[in-house]
Amino acid sequence: MNGWCIRGGTLSLERPLVMGILNVTPDSFSDGGRYDTPETAAARARVMAAEGADILDIGAQSTRPGAEYLSAEEEWARLAPCLRAVQAAVDIPLSVDTFHPQVAARALEAGVHIINDVSGSEQNGMASVAARYGAGMVFMRTGDPSQRTATAEETVAAAKTYFRRVTSLALSAGLSLSSACVDVGIGFGSSVEGDLALIARLDEIAAESLAAAVLVGASRKRVVREICGDDLLAGSVALHTAAMLNGAHIVRAHDVAATVAAARAVNALQKREDI
């Protein structure tokens, strides 16, 4: 497949794409409270669009450890005004980062193109919501803190197993595999060594899924902090570059401009006929 079908069209995967992160939360681990009003969210969306983001991923509920849990109604109340402001500010595909099917359905009704569900999507019926609206869907491998003690080999094996399940899950929900995207879940229930293995062996892991696209989101994650200390930009771009070279079609990033530049360099390398 050379395209990812989302609501209203198809995104070409002939070059790596950059998904810009827009957290409209007060408590996200990296930028909580910076873009949680309609005005600041719209301003940030305009900046990321100008920097070359192909997709914007809007999240109203933090998934960092210990973050406040919001009900579907509370999450939508936070998301809706920011979503409307972003839609008025930019004209690029929008993704909603949620594990509540009710929030996803409302966002799709409002014109969002993609659901990005970090819950794994195996119990909540999210794939059926995506199928009903003809939306693109990101399935992310997730885990619990106990899995941080798993070996790198065990982490890779778990990702392969999850990717195989996703194929069946999507099909049973009526979602076309051309609309499915899989995410190895960097930072979710894996050690630093496990996260590095997920990136280094991404092509091998992705071969277990028939989804149209593969996404990696390492931006400012614990693996970057552990390796690079405070230099989160360089570390994030380095891991995303490795992921793209190993088969990631999409990378999810806070720092859009630098990541877009890296994606262009990767694309230039991929187009060469002598490598």
Image (cartoon, rainbow, N blue to C red):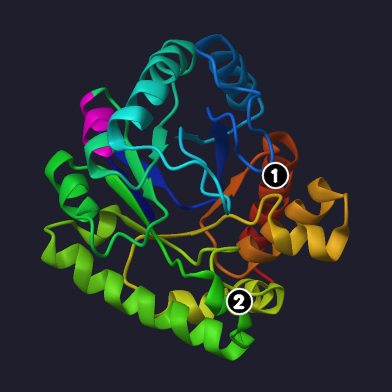
Magenta segment, which residues?
A: 104-109
Of callouts 2 and 1, the N-terminal one: 2
Query: Which percent across, then down, holds residue 54?
Result: 52, 36
Asked whether residue 162 appears in the rendered view, the answer is yes
Who is closer to the viewer here, 150 or 39?
A: 150
Which residue type carries mark 1?
A: Thr
Which residue is pictured at 56% across the width and 50% down the height?
A: 66
Q: Which mark is residue 259?
A: 1
Q: Which part of the image, by quadrant, shows the C terminus?
A: bottom right
Q: Which mark is residue 148?
A: 2
Query: Which percent across, then down, holds residue 194?
Result: 63, 78
Q: Which mark is residue 126?
A: none
Q: Is 121 situated left or right of 68 in this image? A: left
Q: Is 180 situated left or right of 219 in this image? A: left
Query: Which percent across, then down, holds residue 96?
Result: 39, 37
Disc 1 is placed on an element classified as helix
Which residue is pictured at 38% across the width and 43% down the height?
A: 98
Q: Is 50 situated left or right of 86 in this image? A: right
Q: Nearer the viewer, mark 2 or mark 1?
A: 2
